[in-house]
Image (tube, rainbow, N blue to C red):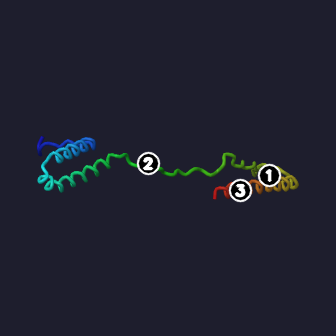
Amino acid sequence: MTGGARRRLRSPFDLLDMGLNRILRWARTTPSRRATSTTKFCAHGLFLVLTVGCATPPPTVEIPIAISCLPQAVPARPAVSSNADLKALDDEGLVLTIAAERLSLIGYSAQAEAVIQACK
């Protein structure tokens, strides 16, 4: 392998173990030597705390999903006569059919507007 040896990535638990070993080594040293190594000890301790903090799992993120506000029972569209059916009727039947279909469409329109207003 060119470029030197690769360093093995350590887990946070390995780093914690290394930190504990450093604490024990530091406690066994003489007081004069402890004073000079305090700065190094604090730096390593801070690194250890920050690294172990990264071992916690990331927080759960909830993403809102749009849900249809329309109810299951949407009003059914009324049946309307075709142009061919209307041409086959006489004048009186044509007027009565158009009037009846108009009333049913007005009722359907009112129901559809109520459903739309419920969504707002």
Q: Which residue is mark 2?
A: 60
Q: Position of residue 7 (x, y in %)?
A: 17, 43
The answer to which of 105 and 99 lies nearer the viewer is 105
Considering the numbered disc 1 on the image, is that residue within a helix, a strand or a loop? helix
Marks 1 and 3: which is nearer the front? 3
Element at label 3: helix
Mark earlier in primary sequence (1, 3): 1
Q: Which residue is mark 1?
A: 86
Q: In this picture, is 119 found above or below 16?
A: below
Dot 3 alpha-carbon crowd within 10 angstroms: few under 14, some 14 to 19, many 20 or more: few
Quote the CA–CA distance across marks 1 and 3. 31 Å
- Give the quadrant of residue 95: bottom right
* Along the viewing direction, whichever of 35 and 101 lies nearer the viewer: 35
Q: Residue at image x 88%, y 55%?
A: 92
The residue identified by callout 3 is 114
Q: Would residue 73 be found to the left or right of residue 34 on screen?
A: right
Relative placement, left or right, of 103 versus 73 is right
Q: Earlier in the sequence, mark 3 or mark 2?
A: 2
Query: Mark 2: which amino acid?
Result: Thr
- The spot of residue 42 in percent (x, y) is 22, 54
Instruction: Specify the label residue 17 is tagged with.
Output: none
Q: How many angstroms separate mark 3 from mark 2 (CA)?
A: 38 Å
